[in-house]
Image (cartoon, helix red, strand yellow):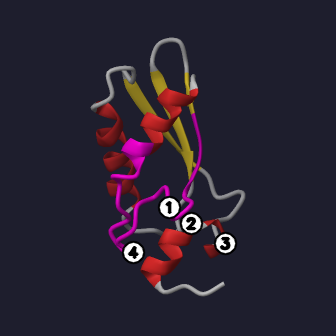
Amino acid sequence: MDQDLKDSIMGALEMVIDPELGVDIVNLGLVYDVEMDEEGTATVTMTLTSMGCPLAGTIVDQVKASLADLPEVKDTEVNIVFNPPWSKDKMSRYAKIALGVRD
């Protein structure tokens, strides 16, 4: 996958807002990796802010919907992992400011 396509995918994922925090999953640092195979299946490896996140299904559905608009992406798989665990250190400066998190 070339860098332009990866940038497009990450840009689309920035439209997915964590419903509890009100900040997108990219700036929260929840997206760990994105890959795409020859058939056009994008695999998004990501985590959640907590293991018991009640909105996991909603977020997965939003990830799939956000990538459906990209012509290169024929299908999307979301791989939820908890290792490495998420921490506020993974958040972008924007997310930290938006949530009032101090370093």
Q: Position of residue 24 (x, y in %)?
A: 40, 61
Determine contact: label 4, label 1, CB under 8 Å: no
Q: Position of residue 14 (x, y in %)?
A: 40, 52
- CA separation, marks 3 and 2? 8 Å
| Mark toward the start of the polypeptide (4 vs 1) | 4
Q: Nearer the viewer, mark 4 or mark 1?
A: 1
Q: Nearer the viewer, mark 3 or mark 4?
A: 3
Going by the numbered disc 2, the residue's amino acid type is: Ser
Q: Which residues are magenta?
A: 11-34
- Mark 4 is surrounded, within 10 Å at the Cα level, by few (under 14), some (14 to 19) or many (20 or more) other residues, namely few
Q: Is residue 88 magenta?
A: no
Q: Where residue 89 is drawn, which disc sits there?
A: 3
Q: Is residue 17 magenta?
A: yes
> Residue shown at 55%/18% (left/top)?
37
**Residue with the mark numbered 4:** 21
Left or right of 93 on screen, residue 84: right
Going by the numbered disc 3, the residue's amino acid type is: Asp
